[in-house]
Image (cartoon, coloured by chain):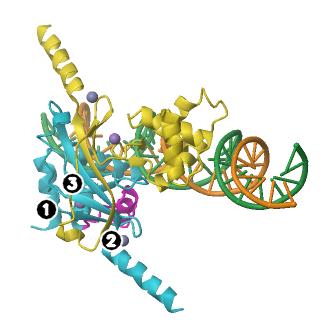
Chain colours: A cyan, B yellow, C orange, D green
Amino acid sequence: MNVLEKARQMLKAKAVRPTIIRVRLLAYLLTHPVHPTAEQIYQALLPEFPTLSKTSVYNTLDKMLEVKLVRLITIDEKETRYDAGTAVHGHFFCKFCRKITDFAANPDYTGCQELSGYEITECNVYLTGICKACLQKINKSQEEEKAV
Amino acid sequence: MNVLEKARQMLKAKAVRPTIIRVRLLAYLLTHPVHPTAEQIYQALLPEFPTLSKTSVYNTLDKMLEVKLVRLITIDEKETRYDAGTAVHGHFFCKFCRKITDFAANPDYTGCQELSGYEITECNVYLTGICKACLQKINKSQEEEKAV
DNA sequence: TACAATATTGTAACCATTACAATTTTATCT
DNA sequence: AGATAAAATTGTAATGGTTACAATATTGTA
Ligand SMILES: [Mn+2]
Ligand SMILES: [Mn+2]
Ligand SMILES: [Zn+2]
Ligand SMILES: [Zn+2]
């Protein structure tokens, strides 16, 4: 089953009409797990849907958020990002390249005193720092500076 | 030592000039650990500083973020909130009353494979749901509905 | 095909945040 | 104290992501 059919199935399973835009947008998220912004999604779909409006992107994302096919990533305060990854996982945000990467995280706060009696529906673990690739770049440029 | 003097000390320790606005703003955060927005901070300080500008609030907060006297809470995608709480802790966001409460959380991701070689500078654990008080309100109104 | 419900579009507005130049305050030196 | 320079604060305007809303197009059903 290709990704378009998969997206269609996922939408149907959540009783969301699998319109062409919804299917392609969800398929885009599934095949591009880089936590894109609404703007990036819009730009990516524009060639295929020349009349696409950004409002449709937001509407579609809102719909999918409602039924939990997509989750919101607010680690970058500048703009919201979206993730079709359903499995529980944490997010790391690199301050240099601004990329967001996944990592394994499955925190359990059921035993937490302060939260007893609370109903928890979403969980996000956000780490911020510098990724390996950027650290290497920084080290390299520092060495070059020393050499001069 | 009162909170103003404490705020002054904290600023000095971070080599940030303890100007009157900075001292009062930090003192406000220390005495109001409710994770206020920039707007709320501005409104709270306005009576004391009638000429206060919102730019100053943002400037002051940015300065304190730089030296880590304050941390950013991005759990509510609508607006950024600020926290002078330095100790490691998690945040719970109630979708109904929009209050953010603290809870004990000290995740350790040093052994995480995906992050080996990464430099982690910030850690945020965000939980979203419905707080105890709001759940009780909802239950009560549901009972009343039944009764009618 | 006709109809009603739903989805999509285009435009304008909203609003938190930022840019920036002008003004004021502060620290330092004579 | 007065002069000077650096830093902080202010006011205004702009930015940009997001939302409101009415008009248009598409879809499902009979
Ligand atoms: Mn992810
Ligand atoms: Mn807190
Ligand atoms: Zn990076
Ligand atoms: Zn609540």
Question: Vertically, is C23 above or below B108?
Answer: above
Residues shaded magenta: A32-51
Magenta segment: does it hold A33?
Answer: yes
For the residues tagged 3 and 1, is the chain the same?
Answer: no
Q: Residues within 10 Å of mark 2 (few under 14, many from 20)?
A: many
Residue at left offset 39%, top offset 65%: A98
Q: Residues within 10 Å of mark 1 (few under 14, many from 20)?
A: some
Mark 2 is on which residue type? Cys
Q: Which quadrant does the C terminus of chain B fall into?
A: top left
Secondary element at tag 3? loop
Q: Which residue is mark 1?
A: A5
Q: Position of residue B58 (x, y in %)?
A: 54, 46
Instruction: Give the quadrant of residue B78.
Output: top left
Q: Which residue is mark 3?
A: B107
How far apart, in angstroms, are the residues tagged by discs 1 and 2?
Answer: 35 Å
Q: Chain of mark 1?
A: A
Q: Which residue is mark 2?
A: A131
